[in-house]
Amino acid sequence: MEKKKVKIKAAVEPKSRVIVSVRDKNGKDNALVVACCCNCSISPPMVMVGIMPSKYSYHMIKENPSFVVNLVSKNQRDIYNYLGSVSGRDEDKLDKINKRDGDIVNASILTDCPVNIECTVINSIITGSHEMFIGKVECIHADEDIINEKGDIDYSKIDFI
């Protein structure tokens, strides 16, 4: 099959459908939809999220270097779409969303999401349009019905967006 050159943009289609929740130094919460998210270390476990400096949440993660990665299933499609289309500059996006404080990090856990990963920022790198925040995984919460007999998350039980 013949290959054709295409417009240069993000080379790998983003597949992560996550919501990252953050809190500023004054205790104000926010959350944003993030497409740039991946595991970046197994030992110790670390996750990397990319946030553009123009995003409202950017100053929050800089002031309070912690975040929660909330994995999203199809049940949270409305929340996902809402958080991805409205800026925290314009309204309190988490006012009507079920949340609670993290156990370890100073950020909110979105309790309707099936998995919540509390992270402390240990480093970051500017890669162009995004700053990639590397977070050490401090704690993982999962809905009881997706945990297998070994105590691991059975990701096949999550109907991801």
Image (cartoon, helix red, strand yellow):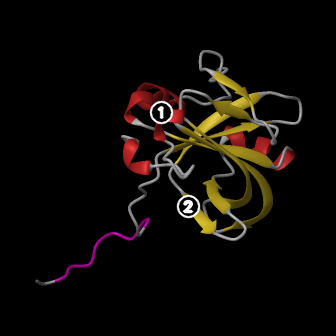
User: Taking 54 as reference, is 121 above or below it?
Assistant: below
Q: Secondary structure at mark 2?
A: strand
- Relative depth, front residue between 121 and 89: 121
Question: In the image, is 153 to the left or to the right of 62?
Answer: left
Find out whether residue 97 is within the magenta segment.
no
Highlighted range, magenta: 3-10
* Amino acid, disc 1: Tyr
Mark 1 and mark 2 in contact? Answer it, CB < 8 Å: no
Which label sits on residue 38? 2
Q: Residue drawn at (64%, 35%), measured in percent from left and top?
A: 31
Residue 18, position as x, y percentages in the image:
52, 44
Looking at the picture, tell me which residue is in the foreground, 30 or 88.
30
Q: Mark yes or no: residue 124 visible.
A: yes
Of callouts 1 and 2, the N-terminal one: 2
Q: Which mark is residue 80?
A: 1
SS class of the residue under badge 1?
Answer: helix
